[in-house]
């Protein structure tokens, strides 16, 4: 059965496709235990999830294909997930012309 899941790496151009919401997982469960990202287009994505480095908690990052920017430290991971899902929805609506 195809559940729509695909495996991407940091080199996968699909990560950066405008409006693509990706669950980052530590296993094959599909649960976003590492974080979520939404593609912004033009080689950029917005990521909320594990801050690079052991035990640092969650953060908001902008990732480009060749550089990254730490935007903020996250206190509430559930709120961060919800925020990213709302941003992804707004990006998708804008791309399709929905209101």
Image (cartoon, helix red, strand yellow):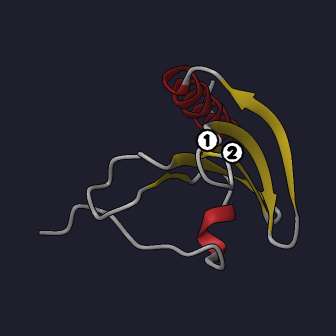
Q: Residues within 10 Å of mark 1 (few under 14, many from 20)?
A: some
Query: Which quarter of the figure has residue 6?
Result: bottom left
Q: Nearer the viewer, residue 94 or 18?
A: 18
Taking the spot 69% from the left edge, 63% from the top edge, the residue there is 16
Q: Nearer the viewer, residue 52 or 22?
A: 52
Q: Is residue 66 visible?
A: yes
* Residue 79 image label: none
Location of residue 48 with respect to 6 vertically, above or below: above
Total marks shown come to 2
Taking the spot 86% from the left edge, 73% from the top edge, the residue there is 66
Residue linked to disc 1: 92
SS at circle 1: helix
Point out residue 63 in the picture as x, y percentages from the top left corner. Answer: 78, 57
- Distance in Å between CA atoms under marks 1 and 2: 5 Å
Residue linked to disc 2: 95
Q: Is residue 97 visible?
A: no
Location of residue 64 with respect to 62 vertically, above or below: below
Point out residue 88 in the picture as x, y percentages from the top left corner. Answer: 60, 38
- Name the residue at the left extreme: 1
CB-based contact (under 8 Å), mark 1 and mark 2: yes
- Name the residue at the bottom extreme: 11
Location of residue 30 with respect to 2 vertically, above or below: above
Q: Is residue 45 left or right of residue 98?
A: right
Placement of the N terminus among the 4 image quadrants: bottom left
Q: Residues within 10 Å of mark 2 (few under 14, many from 20)?
A: few
Taking the spot 59% from the left edge, 45% from the top edge, the residue there is 55
Q: Is residue 36 left or right of residue 26?
A: right
Query: Which quarter of the figure has residue 64?
Result: bottom right
Taking the spot 61% from the left edge, 25% from the top edge, the residue there is 83
Q: Nearer the viewer, residue 88 or 34?
A: 34
Point out residue 36 in the picture as x, y percentages from the top left corner. Answer: 54, 46
Q: Nearer the viewer, residue 74 or 3?
A: 74
């Amino acid at each position: 059965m195809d559940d729509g899941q695909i495996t991407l790496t940091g080199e996968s151009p699909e990560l950066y496709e405008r409006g693509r919401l990706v669950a980052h997982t530590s296993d094959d469960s599909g649960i976003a235990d590492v974080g979520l990202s939404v593609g912004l287009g033009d080689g950029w994505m917005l990521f909320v999830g594990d801050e690079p480095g052991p035990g640092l908690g969650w953060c908001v990052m902008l990732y480009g294909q060749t550089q990254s920017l730490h935007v903020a430290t996250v206190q509430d991971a559930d709120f961060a997930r919800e925020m990213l899902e709302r941003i992804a929805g707004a990006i998708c609506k804008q791309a399709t012309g929905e209101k």
